Amino acid sequence: MQPGDLVHVKADNFYYGIGIIITYDEAELPGCPFYVMTSDGKRLFYFAEELKLVQPDPS
C-alpha cells in the first residue's frame, strides 16, 4: 500500500468506510504509519492490518 491508494478502513471491529492513504511515514508514529483520510473527512493514523486495498471493478 502506498499514498494515493484507496482502502477499506476497519479498526476496533468497526468499519469506517473507504479512505485514501495520504502519507506513509514510519517515523511519524512507529508501527502505525498509514495516515488516511476516510470518506467522512476524518484524518487518522492506522495500522496496516486495519486497511485493505479496494479492488478495482473487473468490468
Image (spheres, grey):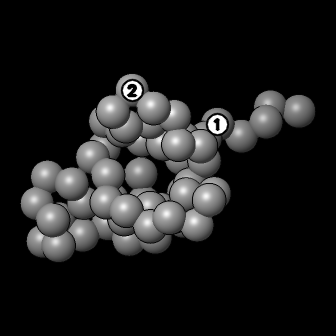
Residue 32: which quarter of the image? bottom left
Q: Is residue 7 left or right of residue 34?
A: right
Q: Is residue 36 left or right of residue 56?
A: left
Q: Determine which residue is flagged by label 2.
A: 13
The x and y percentages for residue 53 are 52, 41
Q: Is residue 35 left or right of residue 59?
A: left
Which residue is at the front of the view, 55 or 12?
A: 12
Q: Quadrant of residue 39?
A: bottom right
Whether residue 52 is visible, yes or no, is no
Crowd around label 2: few <14 · some 14–19 · many ≥20 (10 Å): few
What numbered label is drawn on residue 38? none
Amino acid residing under circle 2: Asn
Q: Amino acid at mark 1?
A: Gln
Mark whose residue sits in front, 2 or 1: 2
**Quadrant of the frame with the C terminus:** top right
Q: Is residue 22 left or right of residue 31?
A: right
The tag earlier along the polypeptide, 2 or 1, is 2
The percent coordinates of residue 52 (x first, y second) are: 47, 37
Q: Secondary structure at mark 1?
A: loop
Which of the 4 image quarters holds residue 23?
Answer: bottom left
* Residue on which disc 1 sits: 55
